[in-house]
Image (cartoon, rainbow, N blue to C red):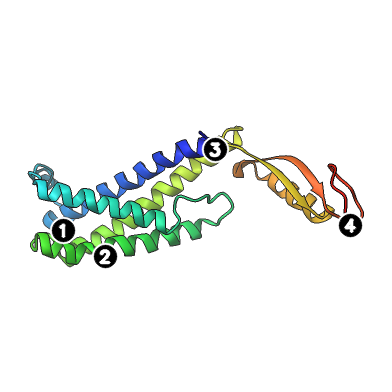
Amino acid sequence: VTRRRSIIPVLKVADLLTVTVAFAASMGLAAQGMDVNAWVAVMQLPISVQNAVFFSAYLAAWHAVLRAVGLYGSYRLAPAAREVGRIGVAVVIAGVPIYPLGKLIDPSAADTGFLLAFVTLAFLGLSVERRGLRLIARFARRRGMNLKRTVIVGERVAASRFAAELSERGDLGYRILELIDLTPGVATGGLSR
């Protein structure tokens, strides 16, 4: 089992916990506003079996959406905006249907205030969580953990330049094992042209 395969389940659980916290906070904001004393009453509400089953299915749908938009792929070389953009797409796909579904289950609980709070908190929560985890990963890579062994294949100048760029960026976590030159007429590593 690779380290990546052991890290991804942690990331999935963190994402679903973030969505759960955003959902609970949105319920409190929509029902009680900013009154801290009233939040205690919201957190003590009994949960019916129907609501527990619905929320479990909803979290499963969130997981499917997060996976479908590609949030469990590697973002080592991608700009932060790409991941944040995909988080936005996931929040719209998974967050907006809660409004009509909520109207079917409990019309008093699903209103536009809840929807706006939930979509906003889910987006901000997932973005902050993902950025925080990326910072931790970069910190670990700078200290030699979670490195990917890499062989660069290309023409001498371009391959050397790329290898130098990767070597300078220790936070990306690439360890260059070998550089294979494909310049015409050069035989390297047993390869000939």
Q: Tell me the residue that label 4 is attached to.
A: 184
Mark 3: amino acid: Phe
Residue 6 in percent (x, y) is at 46, 36
Helix, strand or loop at disc 4? loop
Left or right: where 190 falls relative to 43: right
Mark 1: amino acid: Ala
Q: Is residue 185 something that shows in the picture?
A: yes
Mark 2 surroundings: few (<14), some (14-19) or many (≥20) residues within 10 A? some
Tell me the distance, in whole angstroms, between the alpha carbons under discs 4 and 1: 67 Å
Residue 5 in percent (x, y) is at 48, 39
Helix, strand or loop at disc 2? loop
Please give the name of the residue rendered at 44% of the width and 42% of the height, measured from the top-left corner. Answer: 8
Helix, strand or loop at disc 3? helix
Helix, strand or loop at disc 1? helix
Tell me the distance, in whole angstroms, between the alpha carbons under discs 2 and 1: 16 Å
Q: Tell me the residue that label 2 is attached to.
A: 96
Mark 4 or mark 2, which is nearer the start of the sequence?
Answer: 2
Q: Tell me the residue that label 1 is attached to.
A: 30
Mark 2 or mark 3, which is nearer the start of the sequence?
Answer: 2
Mark 3 or mark 1, which is nearer the start of the sequence?
Answer: 1
Mark 1 or mark 2, which is nearer the start of the sequence?
Answer: 1
Residue 23 in percent (x, y) is at 23, 52
* Callout 3 touching callout 2 (CB < 8 Å): no
